[in-house]
């Protein structure tokens, strides 16, 4: 079993300076590991800190204490408090994030939005676009939409473009933040299949899903986030 | 071409392109900029944000060798691989930086363009300054750059004073990038443009910076510009850098009271 992600004793507190400096503890003592080919689902009620944990791993949120180590270029590398260059490098080569919402760049065609992560990792433009098209087709985005910017799409279509963008990479670690929310049943099953294929390929995944059926389909292990509740 | 530059970016480039150490500028008792230090690597885009009077423009002028610091220094890696103190450069080396290896995009295109000569000449001039002398090739290169910045090539013989604000700014970018600089300074590049024109310009700058693997230092008071263009951000207040880090980290999880205020002051679209 190859450990791909090792979170040790991570803690997050927000200090809200504009609200009189009140301190908002989110999580503490977060510790778990994820192995290659494994999908760990974070569970817990809304506000328990599931998304915050994903954001700490990806580096959107700072980690106040503890370590977040990922297997980057073959070595366990601590990203908590790391130099921006190292975090950016890890995002290009090691760790991907599939969020619920597409941060649409104006005027870029859906096909190119999806192909971009491959281009950044050095895949040729033609290959990248071919793979992007295949994935969009699989997620039932009609070909006539591929050349249009996703900002003009429906919410569900935008989400599927975002999923395609997240799953197209060959990154060994993927963070999934409610990838199936607001998808219809057919597309939910496509996403479940994509996750299964990633497991086969040895990708380590950490997911947040609220749908019990999907959770049962994809989870190899469940980590209960309520045990990391920060003392208020 | 795009693929190789991006692949390079992910690999080597472990040597800094520009190093700022303890940069300070005082005007009498007033310190416009105090003790700013950072390192910029090839292909990296750094945004400097802060409100008017925060010292960000003073800093940009010192970084681009247009203003001598009162203290500290800026070093730049020349194409021969050597890191050199900008204050120690000879005239020929300075000229090389200004004409070829650097670009400088002004907020007001009229400052970066010659308004009375044709668009083609505006772009071609930078090439002639570095020794190009074949008229046909210069015109062809200028024309292909106009296309890249989405200016109708039928307008190549028109002077920029007949252009709209957005077109002028795109022309200024073409003029800067035609010599394939390694570092571009941008001072409020979208300031003064309509929102719809801003979006188009930002998108264009974003893809050019990616494709060319450019390093850039962008001064802006607009956090949306910083988010879309930059990898890293420095927040300035009263001449000092008060917070710095990955752009999405500083904007999603601002730590300093002033940064929290800046981030919370954005109206949602």
Image (tube, coloured by chain):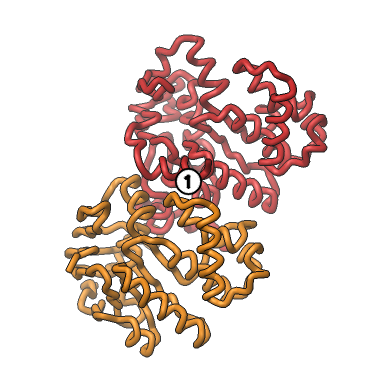
Q: Residue at x 46, y 80 (%)?
A: A190
Q: Which chain is orange?
A: A
Give the total of numbered labels: 1
Chain B colour as displayed:
red
Looking at the picture, how far across and down is residue A189, in whole percent? 45, 84
- A230 lies above or below B147: below
Regarding residue B262, the answer to whether it shows in the image is no
Q: Chain of mark 1?
A: B
Residue picked out by circle 1: B230
Q: Residue at x 55, y 59 (%)?
A: A129
Q: Position of residue B156 (x, y in %)?
A: 78, 32
Q: Position of residue A59 (x, y in %)?
A: 34, 57
Q: Element type at marker 1?
A: loop
The percent position of residue B12, horizontal first and vertical second, equals 34, 38
Q: Is residue A66 above or below residue B233?
A: below
Q: What's the residue at 67%, 52% (across, down)?
A: B195
**Which quarter of the figure has residue B174?**
top right
Q: Is residue B141 left or right of residue A191?
A: right
Q: Is residue B57 visible?
A: yes
Report the front residue among B236 and B124. B124
Q: Residue placed at 37% from the left, 50% from the top?
A: A88
Toward which corner of the image does residue A209 lie, by quadrant?
bottom left
């Amino acid at each position: 079993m190859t450990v791909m992600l090792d979170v040790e004793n991570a803690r997050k507190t927000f200090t809200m300076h504009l609200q009189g400096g009140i301190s908002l503890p989110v999580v503490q003592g977060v510790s778990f590991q994820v192995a290659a080919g494994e999908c760990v689902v974070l569970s817990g009620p809304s506000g328990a800190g599931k998304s915050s944990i994903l954001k700490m791993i990806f580096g959107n949120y700072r980690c106040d204490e503890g370590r977040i180590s990922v297997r980057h270029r073959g070595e366990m590398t601590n990203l908590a408090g790391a130099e921006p260059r190292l975090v950016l490098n890890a995002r290009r080569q090691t760790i991907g994030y599939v969020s619920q919402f597409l941060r649409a760049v104006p005027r870029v065609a859906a096909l190119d939005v999806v192909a971009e992560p491959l281009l950044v990792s050095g895949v040729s433009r033609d290959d990248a676009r071919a793979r992007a098209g295949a994935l969009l087709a699989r997620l039932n985005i009609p070909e006539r939409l591929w050349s249009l910017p996703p900002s003009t799409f429906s919410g569900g279509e935008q989400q599927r473009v975002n999923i395609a963008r997240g799953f197209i990479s060959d990154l060994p670690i993927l963070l999934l933040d409610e990838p199936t929310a607001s998808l219809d049943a057919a597309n939910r099953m496509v996403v479940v299949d994509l996750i299964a294929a990633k497991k086969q390929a040895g990708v380590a995944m950490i997911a947040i899903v609220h749908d019990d059926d999907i959770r049962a389909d994809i989870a190899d292990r469940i980590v209960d986030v309520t045990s990391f509740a920060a003392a208020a | 071409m795009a693929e190789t530059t991006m692949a390079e970016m992910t690999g080597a480039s472990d040597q800094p392109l520009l190093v700022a150490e303890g940069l300070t500028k005082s005007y009498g008792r007033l310190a416009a900029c105090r003790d700013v230090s950072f390192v910029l690597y090839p292909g990296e885009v750094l945004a400097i944000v802060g409100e008017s009077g925060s010292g960000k423009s003073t800093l940009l002028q010192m970084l681009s060798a247009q203003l001598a610091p009162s203290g500290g220094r800026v070093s730049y890696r020349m194409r021969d691989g050597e890191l050199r103190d900008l204050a120690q450069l000879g005239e020929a080396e300075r000229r090389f930086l200004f004409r070829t290896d650097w670009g400088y995009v002004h907020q007001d295109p009229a400052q970066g363009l010659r308004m009375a000569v044709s668009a083609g000449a505006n772009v071609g001039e930078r090439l002639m300054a570095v020794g190009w002398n074949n008229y046909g090739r210069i015109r062809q290169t200028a024309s292909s750059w106009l296309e890249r910045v989405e200016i109708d090539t039928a307008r190549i013989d028109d002077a920029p004073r007949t252009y709209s604000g957005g077109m002028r700014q795109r022309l200024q970018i073409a003029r800067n990038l035609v010599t394939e600089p390694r570092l571009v300074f941008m001072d409020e590049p979208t300031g003064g443009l309509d929102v719809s024109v801003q979006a188009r310009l930002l998108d264009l700058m974003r893809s050019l910076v990616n494709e060319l693997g450019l390093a850039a230092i962008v001064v802006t008071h607009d956090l949306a510009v910083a988010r879309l263009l930059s990898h890293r951000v420095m927040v300035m207040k009263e001449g000092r850098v008060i917070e710095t880090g990955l752009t999405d980290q500083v904007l999603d999880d601002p730590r300093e009271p002033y940064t929290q205020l800046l981030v919370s002051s954005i109206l949602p679209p």
